[in-house]
Image (cartoon, rainbow, N blue to C red):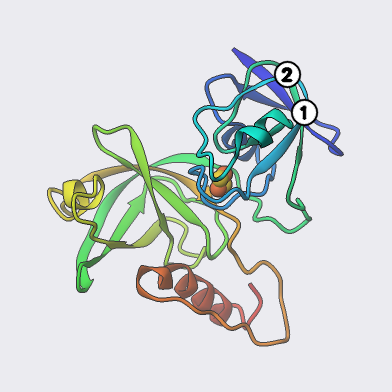
Amino acid sequence: MTHTVTVAGQEQPFPAPADRPILESALRENRWLPHACSQGTCGTCKIRVLAGEVEHGQPDEAVLSADERAAGLALACQASPRTDVTVAPVADVGPEGPRHPLRDHSGTVVELADIARHTRRLVVELDEPMEFSAGQYAELIVPGAGVGRQYSMANPPSEARTLEFHVKWVEGGLATDGWIFAGLRPGDRIELRGPLGQFAMLRAQEEPAILIGGGTGLAPLKAIVRHALANDRVP
Ligand code: FES
């Protein structure tokens, strides 16, 4: 069943299947809602439900408390609509969120290389290009598990068909110990979806930007730096 979601202050509602989180429905319709992790762990996507009902899923009490749920708050990345709903983001929506539709993609592994201790560069050639802003991430679908793991693109948006990810090995990790550091090989097919996330450098600025990161956290910074250099500081 599909309902409609109206964001307060925006005229056009968008369709939202009952079995899909509101955030995902919004992004697939290229409608911006604030979000960061899309996993229910950061709280950035908190919305106030002004009308209608949502199914909350199982939000972490530390991120969305029972009191907040009782007060009409929900996590857009976890909650799905039970009826037509009207919602208002708690965070400022602003005019500047990355505006690229969320899409499912398929691709082929073209490179898998160890670039640091317990860290691999994974390069995927997509069948179709993915629009994204430097700094955003994609969710790689772990084969046979039906779950996704999130990795930032380390390449600039101009390389929209060849995505580079930096993956850190996690002991017992479903995507790492059980897949990317185990059986995955060049030539293998990969399913993913993206782009996601609001970490991005979205406007030209005269002042210097200071980017601080480490380990695989350098990946989105590398994308931003390469993009800024290629565009003479203009993202
Ligand atoms: Fe992080 Fe929803 S809790 S985006």
Q: Answer left or right for 64 relative to 7.
A: left
Q: Is residue 13 above or below residue 140?
A: above
- Residue type marked 1: Pro
Q: Position of residue 149 (x, y in %)?
A: 36, 47
Q: Are marks 1 and 2 in contact (CB under 8 Å)?
A: yes
Q: Does dot 1 land on a helix, a strand or a loop?
A: loop
Q: Does dot 2 land on a helix, a strand or a loop?
A: loop
Going from N to C along the chain, the mark reached first, 1 or 2, is 1
Q: Answer left or right for 169 relative to 11.
A: left
Residue that mark 2 sits on: 84
Kindly tell me whether mark 2's CB lies below 8 Å from ligand 1: no
Q: CA distance from mark 1 to mark 2?
A: 10 Å
**Quadrant position of the C terminus in the picture:** bottom right
Q: Position of residue 10 (x, y in %)?
A: 84, 37
**Quadrant position of the N terminus in the picture:** top right
Q: How many labels, in total?
A: 2
Residue that mark 1 sits on: 13
Which quadrant of the view contains residue 230?
bottom right
At x 54% / y 34%, what residue is drawn?
Answer: 78
Q: Is residue 32 above or below residue 71?
A: below
At x 68% / y 36%, what residue is drawn?
Answer: 68
Q: Position of residue 165 (x, y in %)?
A: 35, 61
Which quadrant of the view contains residue 96?
bottom right
- Residue type marked 2: Asp
Q: Is residue 86 above or below residue 33?
A: above
At x 56% / y 38%, what residue is drawn?
Answer: 77
- Mark number for residue 154? none
At x 32% / y 55%, what residue is drawn?
Answer: 124
